[in-house]
Amino acid sequence: MTAPILQLVEYPDASPEVREVYDDIMKTRGTDWINNFWKILAHDPATLKRTWRDVKEVMAPGALDPLTKELIYIAVSATNGCEYCTYSHTAGARAKGMTDAQLMEVMAVIGMANETNRLANGLRPPVDRQFMPEQPSS
Amino acid sequence: MTAPILQLVEYPDASPEVREVYDDIMKTRGTDWINNFWKILAHDPATLKRTWRDVKEVMAPGALDPLTKELIYIAVSATNGCEYCTYSHTAGARAKGMTDAQLMEVMAVIGMANETNRLANGLRPPVDRQFMPEQPSS
Amino acid sequence: MTAPILQLVEYPDASPEVREVYDDIMKTRGTDWINNFWKILAHDPATLKRTWRDVKEVMAPGALDPLTKELIYIAVSATNGCEYCTYSHTAGARAKGMTDAQLMEVMAVIGMANETNRLANGLRPPVDRQFMPEQPSS
Amino acid sequence: MTAPILQLVEYPDASPEVREVYDDIMKTRGTDWINNFWKILAHDPATLKRTWRDVKEVMAPGALDPLTKELIYIAVSATNGCEYCTYSHTAGARAKGMTDAQLMEVMAVIGMANETNRLANGLRPPVDRQFMPEQPSS
Amino acid sequence: MTAPILQLVEYPDASPEVREVYDDIMKTRGTDWINNFWKILAHDPATLKRTWRDVKEVMAPGALDPLTKELIYIAVSATNGCEYCTYSHTAGARAKGMTDAQLMEVMAVIGMANETNRLANGLRPPVDRQFMPEQPSS
Amino acid sequence: MTAPILQLVEYPDASPEVREVYDDIMKTRGTDWINNFWKILAHDPATLKRTWRDVKEVMAPGALDPLTKELIYIAVSATNGCEYCTYSHTAGARAKGMTDAQLMEVMAVIGMANETNRLANGLRPPVDRQFMPEQPSS
């Protein structure tokens, strides 16, 4: 079992600046604990604040619903092989209602896309004119 | 401009076995043309058939709707940097109703996930016990 | 030690549909056990069947022998950093006769390719005309 | 069309140190031209020499034959999406006798491996005890 | 030549909100033009603003100097194979004083790291106790 | 806990050829132990020698200082998700003087670069003429 690269900053040891972010994370999520990702980012309060602010903004409901956004997060994390993010965002998707059947379908699409991405990378078909967005006439 | 690794197999030059797949692609999609990805896979009819059958099965409506599946395909393709697949599945998502606002939100989530994947990869927080699926007692 | 995202579906708990695939895996491989990859795919029998059918078809002897195919599998898995697949396909290659010397040479080639891929990605030499496949005159 | 990041160092403009490497590349390969990859590395003679020496050593016949090594190179290059390397090593494999049928089978294996890598990354099956190499008793 | 996925938003066509970001980019960089990356993000002013604010904050002088940060950006971009980012950040590094010799050395390190990453991924040495950060006693 | 793919070659069991490399590693680094990466490469003395020689050459002071090179190594390793290399090169960077503040800033840049790489990959802005290196007139 490997140790984290930097010690986890627990709430009682955190500076007021870090606690403020921790409090907002718990309030936004309706939980009473902070996951380890943030406890390690806390070594740089500027990065902690920026990353949390961005996650909060990007994952909020908008043109896409929050569950769809979590599924996309899972797709990226599995493609990159990020263990921590796979666990945290699979848990996040479940908390937003993802069923086992949906999880398995996301996996099937991720697998398929990774397969055809490499068939295209290796055989180099030219992009079809029909797939090209129309450009303004100059 | 680079040339494809193998020549495109156009419909008039295709074997009956390949034409059968081409016909099914056009029928399933309601189009009258075949995109270059399939024209290059046609050099190996077994791979052409298997890949098309899989794509057709995986991308069909199920526990997830077809647009959500296309968004996941875009997320994987942008993460892997596959130019062909980015164009073809962005076009596919548009054909299924994706708006510009949805495209931009998918991009924001993809970017965010790729960012936090690396923060986790580089700082190695342990996976929180709360994110672990419960295991059956043995 | 992290737990799998979904529980493993053991043979006694499997549906007849899943057992049929498990039986074919063991028969095809001449083994009396199922590895965990399939036990987790079993949550979606359609994905289990499709993936096994594809693996069986793709990894069968053809224009390339089965050992060469396992070496290619190892190359992809090490490049992507997939821990599970690295172990399973290294074991698979050994079962097909791979020696330690061959394993070490595969590694040397994988390392070299990953190195020169990035020198090319970073310095962007144009693809030489001589490497371009000849295209049909139109 | 993008330009290379640094100008290509053509033979007549090359230093004696660089020409020596160029001469060895042409002699080893039995060709009368240098491909662009080396012409751009030539900006740093130390890197040019080291990389060529390594490629020459790693790609020489050993426990694996040169064609198998080129197929592995293609697998890595397609997985990473390196355009230049995909063209150069596909050409290299053809020069060593690769048939279209072999190319298409390599692609099928690459695609499959990229697919199952992500199913394993996303579902996190534990590595089976049977796949673990035996360790010496301490 | 492929077209961008969305049209570029030129200054005269931009909303006041977008122009404000464009103005700040030009002012911060001391230039009189906007590069295409921002012109395409402009389709979603929220993402444009967030991304620019983050880039400005992260790339500012801090514990590391701006040139070192650009070199790291090049390393990531070449590793991921991002063409656009490779060109833009190589230009950025040159503007901050990077010499050809430094560029070639960055490339050598990037290549080496990508090579040894895969040797480690494929052979799976356990992380040495000596590399593990000390943990607090509980 | 997974086992290494091949047993570690400890000093007392090593051949004279391997011991020579081990001795040079310890002498160069001023340490009295060998890390596991080399102990596993030792199964192929040619690869062990070549890789150590290359690392020694590439990581030596040159146009860039050794700490900057370690930071670039960390950036590549975190981007690729290589656990072993992340630990070993973070330890290496600390040994060369990296502070916690510098580590956190490297992480911020790595995260940012991985994010914008995918925004560019997904939206495909054309490379700006201004970023293109000038080419010699022919």
Image: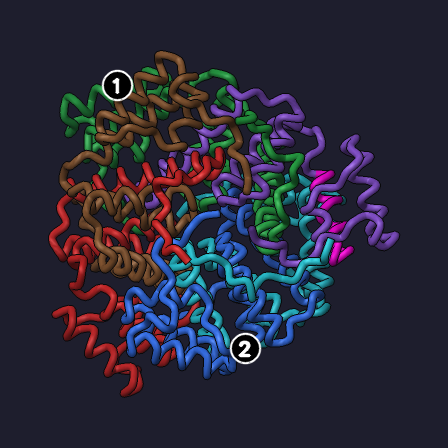
Chain colours: A brown, B red, C blue, D cyan, E green, F purple
User: Which amino acid type is shown beneath numbered disc 1?
Assistant: Asp
| Residue type, numbered disc 2 | Pro
Q: CA distance from mark 1 to mark 2?
A: 60 Å
Count of numbered marks: 2
| Residue occupying the point 33% across, 63% down | A112
Q: Is residue A66 left or right of residue C132?
A: left
Q: Measuring from the top left, give residue C127's x and y in whole percent.
A: 49, 55
Q: Chain of mark 2?
A: C
The chain identifier of the residue carrying mark 1 reads E
* Left or right of D10 in this view: F35: right
Judge the density around disc 1: few (<14), some (14-19), many (≥20) Cα neighbours within 10 Å: some
Where are the magenta residues, as a range?
Answer: F41-57
Name which residue lies at 40% across and 32% down: A36
- Position of E89 with respect to C98 (left or right) is left
- Labels 1, 2: one chain: no
Disc 1 element: helix
Residue F122 lies in the magenta stretch: no
Position above or below: B23 against B92: below
Most extreme residue toward the top, as rendered?
A: A16
Q: Which residue is mark 2?
A: C66
Identity of the residue drawn at 20% across and 27% down: E11
Residue E23 - label: 1
Along the viewing direction, whichever of A11 and F64 lies nearer the viewer: A11
Q: Residue at x 22, y 64 (%)?
A: B59
SS majority, magenta? helix
Q: Percent x, y for residue E35?
A: 32, 31
Q: Vertical placement of C34 versus C131: above or below?
A: below
Which of the two residues, E98 or B64, is positioned nearer the viewer here? B64
Q: Position of residue B94 (x, y in %)?
A: 16, 53
Q: Position of residue F9 (x, y in %)?
A: 76, 53
Q: Residues within 10 Å of mark 2 (few under 14, many from 20)?
A: some
- Which disc number belongs to residue E54? none
